[in-house]
Image (cartoon, grey):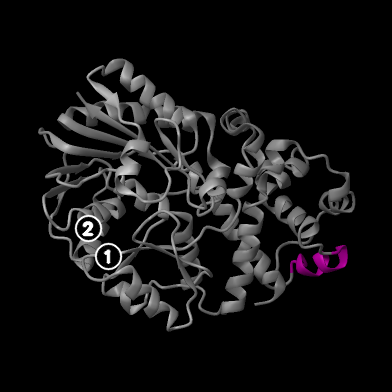
Amino acid sequence: MTPGARITAALELLSCVLTPGEQPFDVIINQYFKQRRYAGSQDRRTILEYIYGVLRSFYKLLYVTQEKLPHSSLMRLCFLAYLKLYLHREEGELNSWFSGIGHAPPRLTTTEQDFLKNLSEDTVNWPEWAEANVPEFLWPEFQKLFGVNAVSEAASLNREATVDLRINLFKTSREFIQKSLESEGIEIIETSYSPFGLRLKKRVNLASHRLYQQGLFEFQDEASQLVSLLCDVQGVNTILDYCAGAGGKTLALSMLMNNKGHIEAYDISSSRLKKAGFRVQRTGCQNVFFLTDVPDKTYDRVLVDAPCSGVGTWRRHPEWRLTLTPEDLMQLTCLQKDIIFKAAQNVKVGGRLIYVTCSLLACENEKIVEDFLIHHPQFKIVPVSIVWESLLKTPCQTTSSFLRFTPYQHKTDGFFIAILEKK
């Protein structure tokens, strides 16, 4: 592909971010390249570097481009700003790439040329929210939550996510998988907190690896692994995974129960449950059952991994920060309240409700739990530190009642967990 054709491909894919559909962005990218077999590995690599470069600096780019062109041309102008500010491309090179010839994008307009001539990083005084690559309306919450570390916390969400593996102790051990991968030249280390996790030092695609296909490990962020562990299922007979999704935590819970007891996984999406079913078969879980309706009975543990903004996973999905609005956040918090109120009905006396999100925001976490407790005095908080210290050898990562993982502090995805017990 020519340089201009690569630019066109990147712009086409970036346009999908601002007009989101039902399919996740990574699926759209895979389908795009599958339909364009002529794009070689270097082409794909360059296009993806463009895309994620723009996404990981989007609010700085937005700040310098705002009100320069109508919204329909916003992504193109952001892309031009990225090429000038971050890749240091000169006017002549940009004119050759934006030539309008063949598969290259249309020629630069006079407005665009004038914009680029006056654009220099030295002349821009970035506001903190732009520097941090956070939507402006969210920045006060970051500041309130993290104080002097707000910029550092936000910056950590811009870095590339790690690849973490959860070892399937049904079939193997962490030591075996580590030695097997190292024998193939794959650099790997043990995770800092999870006793059954491994982390790749360098990103390698292991989706087609024989050990994965045999169900010996799963791809799961370390914080997500710890959420399952902190459900504390030792001696537990029944679990309801209320928002099971594709089953990542369901599989981990099954492993921790050593295939004993009874886990029921519920989700409103039949396609996600179908995917979970394939994973259950591959990994050898025998105590997992899938539900299409919420049952009218109680359980020892009810795990609520609530739908949320996904702020804690921006490393993996940098496109999500572009489309989140205050209205979206309000709708999500209403949904979270509704779900946790309903899920509470399925908790046995003496049982536990574990509320989890992959968001960092207090409005989706502490405030939801605090509101829940006001209306449900029969529940009490179980400090996460108590559960952590009974299960893990490493020091507990919180001194408060709840636990918030962040990429900056823990080198994991952002996760929040609260443990509530029915008195």
Please tell me whether residue 236 is drawn above or below residue 281 in the rendered image: above
Left or right of residue 283: residue 297: left
| Residue underneath mark 1 | 168
Please tell me whether residue 255 is drawn above or below residue 422 in the rendered image: below
| Residue underneath mark 2 | 255
Residue 190: % across, % down: 43, 64
Q: Is residue 98 magenta?
A: yes
Q: Amino acid at mark 2?
A: Met
Of the pair 57 and 349, the residue shown nearer to us: 349
- Determine the residue positioned at 27% across, 59% down: 275
Q: Quadrant of the N terminus?
A: bottom right
Region rendered in magenta: 90-100
Are the two marked residues, 2 and 1, in contact with CB atoms closer than 8 angstroms? Answer: yes
Of the pair 135 and 173, the residue shown nearer to us: 173
Q: Main secondary structure of the magenta part?
A: helix
Left or right of residue 161: residue 395: left
Q: Amino acid at mark 1?
A: Asn
Which quadrant would residue 386 be assigned to in this image? top left
